[in-house]
């Protein structure tokens, strides 16, 4: 296992991938198949999301454990403040350490479906920076990643303000920033410049989501407030939703997006896989030299 601070000090871009715990037995079987392909690319780590409202608490830790023991890859659980009292945060942290993880992605989480405003749990946290502070004071056995927003957060469209809040999270003890998905690299570069100007000095890793199916990405971007550039949208909409041709456009776009990022000194690339290996494999097979991977 490797801590974020060690991994990103190695001097070459780190490939990381994100998966989620499936809801059905078929989904789990499929994920193991996809993980076989994904882990062949030797990612620096695989991160496992934490379901809305804490709905996957046990599965997140179970999958984190499975990735490490079955696939022998560094794995990292996510955690959110949704519904979490201090006692349950302590318990989750203890379990995270007990399964051998050395890192965690610490988030506030979104308001549960049907609610527009985030309400902290009784004795819980309102913002992710409080969670980071809490974990830091509780243990020194975990490195911590937090979320950054190249286009501002959906509840705070002011990029400057949103990045000032990120600085507070980093100062609270985060070792790494992983960004929300975005499709215009200029948004990332602008955000990174601002973050550096503000004194954020931990690695800032761009998160990218290759487009597999337009309707799915349209829904996700609406929820998280990321924009799909007009020309990309037009290209995608030339083809039937979910068709092979549409997927092809999405994968080619992701490869070129990743190439430009890697040529502009990013410390790594975090790929939101949606539990599907195809696009990630295409990116890594095309751009493997940047990660020092020649045999994928
Ligand atoms: C890489 C990545 C992984 C993710 N994984 C998950 C996951 O596994 N499960 C899940 O449910 N969600 C996940 N999310 C989504 C995330 O939970 C949402 O984006 C959530 O709305 C905000 O979480 P945060 O940790 O950024 O919160 P915060 O940093 O607390 O920000 C929340 C809001 O409060 C504002 N804010 C922050 N600090 C302050 C302050 N000091 N004063 C006033 N306002 C402030 C921010 O501008 C923002 O609008 C992920 C996001 C990313 C980018």
Image (cartoon, rainbow, N blue to C red):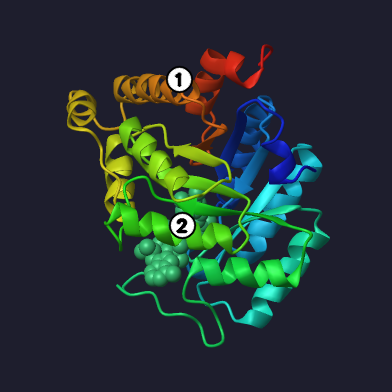
Q: CA distance from mark 1 to mark 2?
A: 26 Å
Q: Could you tell me which residue is drawn at 80 percent across and 57 percent down?
A: 99
Left or right of 151, for residue 13: right
Query: Whole-percent x and y of residue 144?
Result: 64, 55
**Label 1 or label 2, whichever comes before in sequence order:** 2
Left or right of 176, for residue 92: right
Q: Could you tell me which residue is drawn at 71 percent across and 75 percent down?
A: 90
* The quarter of the displayed image where residue 243 is located: top left
Query: Whole-percent x and y of residue 172?
Result: 59, 64
- Which corner quadrant of the figure contains ligand 1? bottom left
* Residue sitting farthest toward the bottom: 122
Left or right of 75, for residue 242: left
Callout 1 secondary element: helix
Q: Is residue 88 above or below residue 78?
A: below
* The quarter of the displayed image where residue 105 is located: bottom right
Callout 2 secondary element: helix
Give neighbour class at mark 2: few <14, some 14-19, many 20+ (Cα, 10 Å): many
Query: Whole-percent x and y of residue 121?
Result: 50, 82
Q: Could you tell me which residue is drawn at 29 percent across and 24 percent down?
A: 246
**Residue tagged 2:** 166
Tag shown at residue 259: 1
Quarter of the figure with the C terminus: top right
Q: Is residue 86 visible?
A: yes
* The quarter of the displayed image where residue 10 is located: top right
Q: Is residue 153 visible?
A: no
Q: Is mark 2 within 8 Å of ligand 1?
A: yes
Q: Could you tell me which residue is drawn at 67 percent across and 50 percent down?
A: 76
């Amino acid at each position: 296992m490797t801590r974020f601070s060690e991994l990103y000090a190695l001097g070459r871009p780190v490939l990381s991938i994100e998966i989620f715990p499936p809801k059905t037995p078929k989904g789990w079987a499929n994920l193991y198949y996809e993980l076989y392909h994904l882990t062949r690319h030797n990612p620096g780590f695989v991160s496992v999301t934490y379901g809305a409202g804490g709905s996957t608490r046990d599965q997140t830790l179970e999958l984190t454990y499975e990735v490490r023991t079955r696939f022998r890859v560094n794995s990292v659980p996510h955690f959110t403040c949704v519904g979490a009292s201090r006692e349950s945060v302590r318990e989750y942290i203890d379990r995270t350490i007990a399964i051998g993880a050395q890192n965690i992605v610490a988030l506030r989480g979104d308001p549960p479906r049907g609610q527009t405003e985030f309400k902290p749990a009784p004795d819980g946290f309102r913002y992710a920076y409080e969670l980071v502070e809490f974990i830091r004071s509780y243990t020194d056995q975990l490195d911590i990643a937090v979320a950054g927003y190249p286009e501002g957060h959906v509840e705070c469209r002011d990029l400057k303000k949103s990045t000032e809040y990120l600085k507070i999270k980093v100062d609270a003890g985060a070792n790494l920033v992983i960004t929300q998905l975005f499709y215009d690299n200029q948004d990332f570069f602008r955000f990174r410049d601002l973050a550096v100007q503000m004194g954020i000095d931990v690695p800032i890793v761009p998160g990218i989501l290759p487009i597999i199916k337009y309707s799915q990405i349209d829904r996700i971007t609406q929820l998280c407030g990321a924009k799909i550039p007009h020309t990309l949208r037009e290209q995608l909409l030339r083809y039937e939703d979910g068709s092979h041709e549409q997927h092809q456009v999405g994968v080619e776009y992701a490869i070129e997006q990743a190439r430009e990022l890697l040529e502009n000194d990013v410390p790594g690339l975090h790929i939101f896989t949606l539990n599907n290996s195809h696009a990630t494999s295409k990116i890594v097979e095309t751009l493997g030299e940047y990660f020092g991977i020649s045999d994928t």
